Image: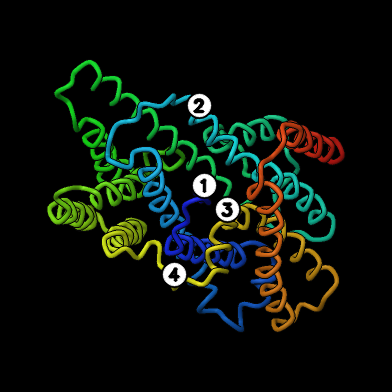
């Protein structure tokens, strides 16, 4: 969900805003009692958001793959930078606003447990759970998530790390065997195909990058085909790959990922990525989309709690609560973005964020025991 703000692409920022708001709306529809009370007023929309809203996250995987290829392998070349340094930088970028939002999430859940009973409210954390979330291992260690959507952050980090290691490995091999000039493309294509035709068809792998690499790889390939000397040929191959994957096993998530990959490819070809027709506020919200995504769960928990505890459970009032939660999520996300993403973060903040997260979690854990 993040990209270099020095080279903005308004078209992609607009796509990120759409994805982000769909995911927030999806979580508003399934977490907390407000959506249950408001259900009679908009049952069709809420049913759709509950069932299909989560598919929007596939768009983020494609977009991120596209941007990673543009930034780290813009000519389709293998990576020659230090992979550990790149992975470390990515981890720091992801974890900084993530820990701030998680700290608020566990505090909001503690408040919610006092005033209402609902299955969407996470329980008090334990020590392993807190440590697993810091190192983005919560799903792999089968620890309950402390906030909605944090699985995405872990998978994003896995996908980035896997891509970096593949590109760096290709570079090392090509240094020894100069004739293997397209090894990086072959490896990325192989991973993408393996994911589309095997890993993504088996839920056993859905806590790993292998399950989602089909969407991520389509984003990478969409960018590479757009800078190829044989654009028409490789664009046809990309379309054929998506078509065959859907013919063998139609999955709406892959249909969405494939559609977005082709859209980005065409937008790049027609120079629409830097379109000046995209409103400035959408570009700004696109930059803040990661922070909005992170902060929305504690915000909706707090508003759900207040509306459940202090206001009548009438559908119209609870619908107003849903709209308020959406607006408050956007506003809070912008504040978080300005604090921890838009400007450099000091070392002191980097130290105090995990310390504050662990302290808050342990205090809540001890208080609930």
Q: Name the residue under label 4.
A: 276
| Horizontal and vertical percent position of residue 10 | 46, 63
Left or right, 92 with reference to 6: right
Q: Which of marks 1 and 3 is in front?
A: 3
Name, please, the residue furthest toward the top: 176
Viewer-nearest of labels 4 and 2?
A: 4
| Residue occupied by mark 1 | 152
- Does residue 149 appear to the left or right of 53 in the view shown? right
Disc nearest the viewer among 3 and 4 = 4
Between 90 and 123, the one lying in front of the other is: 90
| Rendering quarter of residue 193 | top left
Q: Which of marks 1 and 4 is in front?
A: 4
In contact (CB < 8 Å): disc 1 and disc 2: no
Spatial CA span between label 1 and label 4: 30 Å
How far, Cα to Cα, is label 1 from label 2?
22 Å
Circle 2 SS class: helix
Would residue 251 be seen by someone viewing this image from the given angle? no
Secondary element at image label 4: loop
> Which residue is drawn at the image coordinates 69% and 45% (left, top)?
102
Judging depth in this view, the residue of 104 and 292 nearest the camera is 292
Which x, y percent locates residue 113? 79, 54
Q: Which residue is drawn at 71% across and 45% down?
A: 100
Residue 313 in view: yes
Write down the quadrant of residue 327 in the picture. bottom right
Determine the CA span between mark 2 and mark 3.
Answer: 22 Å
Q: What element carries label 1?
A: helix
Q: Mark 3 points at which residue?
A: 290
Up-down: is 350 above or below 32? Answer: above
Which of the labelled discs sits on residue 85, or is there none? 2
Which sits earlier in the primary sequence, circle 4 or circle 2?
2
Seen at 81% across and 39% down, the residue is: 360
């Amino acid at each position: 969900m993040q990209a270099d703000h020095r080279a903005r692409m308004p078209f992609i920022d607009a796509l990120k805003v759409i994805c982000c708001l769909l995911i927030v709306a999806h979580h508003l529809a399934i977490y907390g009692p407000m959506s249950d009370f408001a259900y009679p007023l908009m049952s069709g929309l809420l049913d759709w958001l509950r069932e299909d809203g989560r598919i929007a996250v596939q768009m983020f995987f494609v977009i991120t793959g596209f941007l990673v290829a543009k930034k780290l392998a813009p000519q389709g070349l293998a990576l020659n930078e230090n992979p550990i340094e790149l992975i470390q930088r990515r981890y720091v970028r992801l974890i900084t606003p993530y820990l701030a939002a998680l700290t608020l999430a566990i505090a909001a859940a503690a408040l919610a447990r006092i005033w209402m009973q609902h299955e969407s409210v996470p329980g008090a954390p334990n020590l392993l759970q807190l440590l697993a979330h810091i190192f983005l291992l919560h799903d792999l260690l089968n620890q309950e998530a402390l906030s909605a959507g944090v699985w995405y952050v872990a998978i994003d980090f896995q996908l980035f790390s896997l891509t970096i290691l593949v590109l760096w490995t290709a570079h090392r091999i090509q240094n020894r065997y100069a004739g293997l000039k397209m090894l990086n493309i072959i490896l990325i294509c192989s991973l993408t195909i393996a994911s589309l035709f095997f890993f993504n068809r088996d839920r056993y792998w859905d806590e790993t990058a292998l399950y989602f690499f089909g969407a991520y790889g389509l984003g990478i390939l969409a960018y590479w085909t757009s800078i190829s000397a044989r654009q028409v040929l490789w664009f046809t191959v990309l379309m054929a790959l998506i078509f065959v994957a859907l013919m063998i096993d139609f999955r709406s998530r892959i249909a969405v990922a494939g559609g977005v990959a082709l859209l980005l490819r065409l937008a790049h070809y027609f120079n629409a990525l830097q379109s000046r027709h995209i409103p400035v506020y959408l570009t700004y919200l696109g930059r803040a989309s990661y922070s909005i995504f992170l902060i929305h769960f504690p915000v909706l928990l707090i508003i759900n709690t207040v509306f459940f505890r202090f206001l009548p459970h009438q559908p119209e009032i609870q619908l107003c609560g849903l709209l308020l939660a959406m607006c408050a999520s956007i506003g809070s996300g912008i504040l978080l973005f300005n604090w921890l993403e838009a400007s450099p973060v000091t070392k002191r903040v980097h130290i105090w964020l995990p310390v504050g997260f662990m302290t808050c979690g342990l205090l809540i854990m001890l208080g609930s025991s």
